[in-house]
Amino acid sequence: MATAEKTEIAKKKTGEVSLAVNFEEDASGFEDMGQDDLALPFLRILTNMSPEIGAVDGANPGMIYNSVTGELHDGKAGVQVIPCAYVRQYIEWAPRGQGSGGPVNIFPATSDILSRTHREPGDNKDYLDNGNYIENSAQHYVMILDSAGSPSPALIIMKSTQLKKSRKWNSMMMSIKAQGKDGLFTPPMFSQIYRLTIVSESNSKGNWHGWEIEKVGQVEDAGVYGIAKTFSASIKSGDVKAKHQDENAKQEEGKTHDIF
């Protein structure tokens, strides 16, 4: 390699290092940003009736969609995530086509709200006397790992047919044991990495796409572990809260994957 070319490469590398140092020293501008100023992405399974189909380039049923970044993930390849917290709630929604598209009420998992509901013939929704319906919502707060292993937060909501997948995932996490100084213990959920893929499912009422979950292994990067731990703590403290929206608001009533 010519001397001039080597010098140019050396200068470029030196410049990159110096700039990286400046980035670290000058890290600022976010002092007045709180959680209310940030959007927590939702990871959703795209269906035939998802509004993103035809509106987002490359979007197809069975893909995984990031509601904030707009990133699409191939459903068969899936995504790797670190689970950080789990919350189950009962969410009250107005009938589709009515209301603001946001929840009418949110009830904790300890609520007896389902005892005040009924079902209509041929419909598996739990309706209140006011016409609104209650949805049992299993919420998994995760860190998505990109191809470089860098984490970013997201929320995965499992409901209806996917509640059994949520229970399976919870059981998988609870079943992991490690040997400690005082015997066996259950490691924190954010100590493990899982791969989530999409599979085709069906029953007598139709076909849809659902989640498939497999354990990859434990978190090896201390920095990633610390980020996941901090995210977990922020959810438990209430600093991070999901802003729920009816993802089916723009879809035709009764034709979504979660009716089965």
Image (spheres, grey):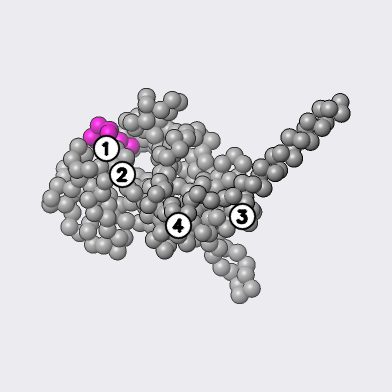
Q: Is disc 1 surrounded by few (<14), some (14 to 19) or many (20+) residues within 10 Å?
A: some
Picture quadrant where residue 255 is located: top left
Task: Name the residue carrying label 2.
Answer: 245
Closer to us: 34 or 238: 34
Q: Is residue 147 left or right of residue 239?
A: right
Q: Is residue 241 left or right of residue 74?
A: left
The residue type indicated by label 1 comes to Ala
Whether residue 18 is situated above or below residue 54 in the rendered picture: below
Q: Nearer the viewer, mark 3 or mark 4?
A: 3
Picture disc at residue 85: 4
The residue type indicated by label 3 comes to Gly
The part of the chain drawn in magenta is 249-260
* Image x and y of residue 20, in percent: 66, 44
Task: Name the residue carrying label 1.
Answer: 249
Find out whether residue 254 is within the magenta segment. yes
Q: Residue at x 45, y 26 (%)?
A: 58
Label 4 SS = strand
Label 2 SS = loop
Q: Is disc 4 surrounded by few (<14), some (14 to 19) or many (20+) residues within 10 Å?
A: many
Q: Earlier in the sequence, mark 3 or mark 4?
A: 4
Which quarter shows the N terminus?
top right
Label 3 SS = helix
Picture disc at residue 80: none
Q: CA distance from mark 1 to mark 4?
A: 27 Å
Task: Name the residue carrying label 3.
Answer: 223
Q: Is residue 123 left or right of residue 165?
A: left
Q: CA distance from mark 2 to mark 4?
A: 20 Å
Closer to us: 245 or 38: 38
The residue type indicated by label 2 comes to Gln
Q: CA distance from mark 2 to mark 3?
A: 32 Å
Q: Earlier in the sequence, mark 1 or mark 3?
A: 3
Q: Nearer the viewer, mark 1 or mark 3?
A: 3
